[in-house]
Image (cartoon, grey):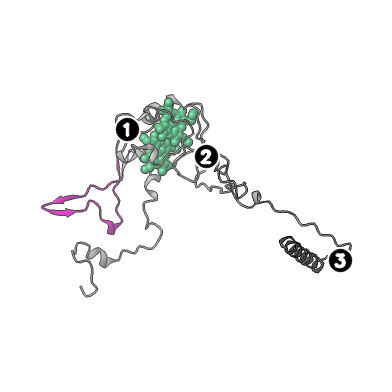
Amino acid sequence: MKTIRNITIGLVATTLLIVGCADKATPAGDTKTVKAVTEESLGLRKTDIYSEESTAASKTEYRTEMAGASAKITRAFQDAPPMIPHGTDGMLPIKISDNQCTGCHMPDVASSMGATPIPVSHFTDFRPKHGVVDGVFKKAVDNYKNEVAIKKTDKLQGSRFNCTLCHAPQSQGNLAVENTFEAKYTSKDGANLSTWSGSNLTDGLNTIKDGENFVTESDIANKDSAAGYLNEH
Ligand code: HEC
Ligand code: HEC
């Protein structure tokens, strides 16, 4: 009995299939080839959807060439912090008592090491020294006048001590999606050199140079008011 029912179901299914095919039958002579799309080609993973274990992103592979034997990496944009092109084995983490980066990159030794010297910006103190005068908090800069604190020093600034905060190594792994970004440098050697020195260092900080200044005369006149500025004032 069971077998007969199964056969019947089988027959019905076959009939449906035949009918289905007959419906979509293409006219004679018009043979279409439909390209098969494999699961492997559907997404970024390049594996079928059942193989989780063998599905892994390309490995992070930092360069291992010793400092002095590596090729510099083109800057991502004008004045981007350059990527570290050489291996950093044994150099990290940077400690207060052990910063090997400075051993080769400080301006006084850099040229003899063939390394790019740490630029002027890293020796410039941009931190305003606010203070308390007679128990009252006193700002060192007047933000209403668009003042910024800039002091050139001959000391590597603490804010720049931990180089890897901003300078990172670059992995050589294969990209899942090609990066087509093209940098437009504002200086002709921007691909390899910082312009952040001399007067250029502060140019970008003068934010109201060519534009509208939203600080009004009244703002300036009332800048010391503890309550802020009121129109009726
Ligand atoms: C043994 C000397 C040495 C040490 C230590 C060293 N570097 Fe370098 N660095 C170089 C040299 C030399 C180059 C130039 C590329 C080359 O020749 O390998 C360079 C290149 C660089 C660049 C690219 C500069 C550019 O103009 O594109 C960066 C960024 C950098 N190093 C950062 C670091 C950091 C951060 C550390 C510490 C983790 C460090 N370096 C430690 C010697 C050194
Ligand atoms: C707070 C982020 C920051 C830290 C920390 C930092 N840098 Fe930089 N570095 C930058 C930026 C941004 C630039 C590009 C603009 C400039 O020159 O200031 C740069 C540029 C450089 C350059 C290229 C100079 C040139 O003339 O092209 C070198 C070399 C460099 N840094 C080395 C170092 C080293 C070594 C340390 C650690 C002692 C360090 N930096 C710490 C942000 C940083």
- Point out the tag, 2 or 3, that comes first from the N-terminus: 3
- Point out the tag, 1 or 3, that comes first from the N-terminus: 3
Question: Which residues make up the magenta segment?
Answer: 127-154
Residue 27: mark:
3
The residue furthest front is 1
Q: Amino acid at mark 3?
A: Pro
Q: Secondary structure at mark 2?
A: loop
**C-alpha distance separating marks 1 and 3:** 77 Å
The residue furthest top is 112
The verdict on label 1 being within 8 Å of ligand 1 is no
**C-alpha distance separating marks 2 and 1:** 28 Å
- Find disc 2 in the rendering and name its residue: 74
Q: In this view of the protein, can residue 172 be seen by the observer? A: yes
Q: In percent of the image, x 51 and y 29: which residue is there?
A: 70
- Find disc 1 in the rendering and name its residue: 95
How far across and down, in percent of the image, does residue 90 sit? 40, 28
Q: Nearer the viewer, residue 211 or 102?
A: 102
Q: Secondary structure at mark 3?
A: loop
Q: Amino acid at mark 1?
A: Lys
